[in-house]
Image (cartoon, helix red, strand yellow):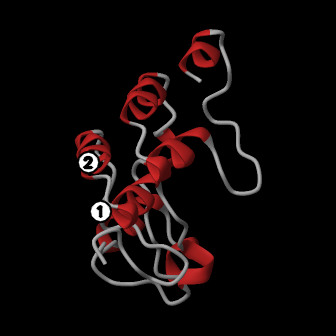
Amino acid sequence: MIEQLEAKANPLYEKEGWNPLLWAACNGNEDIVRALIKRNACAPYLNQKSGGGDEDNKDEADADEDFDPFVKPKDARKYGKYTPLHWASYKGFYKVVWILLKEKMSPLDIDMYGNTAVH
């Protein structure tokens, strides 16, 4: 797979809810996780906000001030999604967890059930 990435494959490609970074984290492949991070595959998972519902009507400055990452959103099914950090921690791939945390992936992001990666 690393050879395919070097051949300019799209690291953000997604099919049926899966992308290369999710797959690599779920399977504990540290080398592929690192190669994908170098190609900015973690960008969709950085700076996520698990919004509380009313933020859609506010301008960005007000939303940033009011945002509290420790408050679960009203509808986790709407705001939550599985992240590579969720999968790596669920499967017990602690080296991959550390790699993703070093890349500033938030352990506070929630899945569709309102659970964090630490849960």
Looking at the image, the residue that sits furthest to the right is 16
State the residue at coordinates (42%, 22%). Answer: 38
Residue kind at label 2, given as amino acid type: Leu
Verify CB contact (< 8 Å) between mark 1 and mark 2: yes
Q: Nearer the viewer, residue 77 or 36?
A: 36
**Of marks 1 and 2, which one's residue comes earlier in the chain?**
2
Can you give x and y, in whole percent of width and height, for residue 95 in the image?
25, 44
Relative horizontal placement of residue 18, taking residue 32 as reference (left or right):
right
Can you give x and y, in whole percent of width and height, for residue 100 in the image?
32, 44
Q: Quadrant of the C terminus?
A: bottom left
Q: Nearer the viewer, residue 43 or 26?
A: 26
State the residue at coordinates (31%, 72%). Answer: 69
Residue kind at label 1, given as amino acid type: Pro
Q: Quadrant of the N terminus?
A: top right
State the residue at coordinates (52%, 82%). Answer: 54
Residue 8, picture quadrant: top right
Task: Name the mark on residue 101.
Answer: 2
Q: Secondary structure at mark 2?
A: helix
Can you give x and y, in whole percent of width and height, for residue 50 in the image?
45, 71
Indicate whether 22 appears above or below 63. above
Q: Would you call the spot at circle 2 few (<14 residues within 10 Å), some (14-19), or many (20 or more)?
A: few
In 3D space, how far apart are the residues under numbered discs 1 and 2 (Cα atoms)?
8 Å
State the residue at coordinates (70%, 37%). Answer: 13
Q: Secondary structure at mark 1?
A: loop
Q: Nearer the viewer, residue 90 or 39?
A: 90
Indicate whether 31 appears above or below 107. above
Q: Would you call the spot at circle 1 few (<14 residues within 10 Å), some (14-19), or many (20 or more)?
A: some
Indicate whether 84 appears above or below 110. above
Can you give x and y, in whole percent of width and height, for residue 16 in the image?
76, 56
Task: Name the mark on residue 107.
Answer: 1
